[in-house]
Image (tube, rainbow, N blue to C red):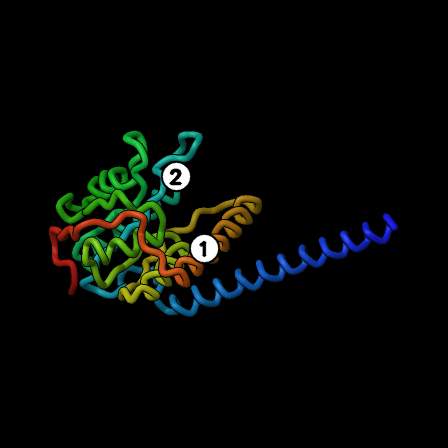
């Protein structure tokens, strides 16, 4: 009797695991197709290919790694943002990121790095409530009135951000920042993280999620739209 019960329990657990795995694979596939369909043909490797008269949106990340070394993702995004500014394609830049404490301030770090590369300070606006990609994109339009957008980040992240913008009805393209060489374990970790982020993005879409922080519109110190 015990063996029969244990077999039944095992079979049920096996079916639950298989069903859960199938649902996860399906969710990842749907998120991938949705992202690529919305962003198809809109992510560029050169500033010259980006639509002119746009507002640049630089997505935030930490300036340094946990070991204190420079974060090459940060360095690449800053260089791409400076390049698109100096190309004349954008009227100004919004740097959007996390400002969880006085000691951790992504927007201020990005602004300082851009000024050091010759971008005028008066053409850079900080969004301190860009707690995630969805919020950064939505706030760029809803709070600052910016459109069209050129979103600046590494390719996979930029593709997802453009998909978010298009879903929200915001005209947008992306400039892909330089990729960072990584080893296989790190690549796998980043791949899984991006897949999870895309599934979360679809959940945001179907639940009509609002940004965590909204407030009064803040006019940009340069034309917000072309």
Q: Which mark is residue 66?
A: none
Residue 43 in which image quadrant:
bottom left
Left-right relation of 9 to 76: right
How many numbered marks, from 0 up? 2
Closer to the chain start, of discs 2 and 1, is 2
* Residue 200 numbered mark, or none: 1
Provide residue 199's location: percent of width, then percent of height.
Answer: 48, 57
Pointer 2 local density, CA inside 10 Å: few below 14, some 14–19, many at least 20: some
- The quadrant of the picture occupied by the C terminus is bottom left
Badge nearest the viewer, 2 or 1: 1
Residue that protrudes farthest toward the front in the picture: 1
The residue under the point 40% across, 54% down is 157
Q: CA distance from mark 2 to mark 1?
A: 25 Å
Residue 133 position within the rendered picture, expressed as x and y whole percent measured from the top left: 35, 52
Label 1: how many Cα within 10 Å (few below 14, some 14–19, many 20+): some
Q: Is residue 60 left or right of residue 108?
A: right
Give the camera-side residue of 21 and 190.
21
What residue lies at 67% left-to-right and 56% top-to-bottom?
A: 16
Kindly state the secondary structure of the residue where label 1 is placed: helix
SS at circle 2: loop
Tag 2–tag 1 contact (CB < 8 Å): no
Instruction: Give the residue pinned by disc 2.
Output: 71
As drawn, 1 above or below 166? above
Give coordinates of residue 41: x percent, y percent. 37, 69
Q: Is residue 40 above or below residue 47?
A: below
Q: In the rendered view, does 132 fall on the left or right side of 11?
A: left
Residue at 28 percent across and 47 percent down: it is 213
Image position, residue 75 (x, y; %): 34, 43
């Amino acid at each position: 009797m015990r063996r029969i019960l244990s077999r039944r329990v095992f079979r049920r657990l096996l079916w639950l695991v298989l069903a859960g795995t199938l649902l996860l694979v399906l969710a990842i596939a749907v998120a991938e197709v949705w992202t690529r369909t919305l962003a198809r043909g809109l992510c560029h490797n050169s500033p010259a290919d980006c639509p002119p008269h746009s507002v640049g949106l630089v997505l935030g990340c930490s300036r340094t790694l946990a070991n204190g070394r420079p974060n090459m993702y940060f360095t690449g995004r800053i260089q791409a943002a400076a390049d698109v500014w100096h190309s004349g394609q954008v009227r100004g830049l919004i740097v959007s990121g996390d400002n969880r404490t006085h000691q951790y301030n992504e927007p201020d770090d990005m602004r300082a790095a851009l000024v050091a590369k010759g971008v005028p300070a008066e053409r850079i606006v900080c969004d301190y409530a860009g707690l995630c990609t969805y919020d950064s994109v939505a706030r760029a339009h809803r709070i600052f009135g910016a459109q069209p957008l050129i979103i600046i980040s590494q390719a996979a992240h930029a593709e997802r951000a453009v998909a978010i913008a298009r879903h929200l009805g915001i005209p947008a393209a992306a400039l892909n920042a330089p990729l960072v060489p990584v080893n296989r374990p790190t690549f796998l970790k980043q791949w899984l993280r991006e897949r999870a982020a895309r599934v979360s993005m679809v959940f945001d879409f179907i639940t009509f999620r609002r940004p965590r922080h909204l407030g009064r519109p803040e006019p940009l110190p340069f034309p917000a739209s072309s």
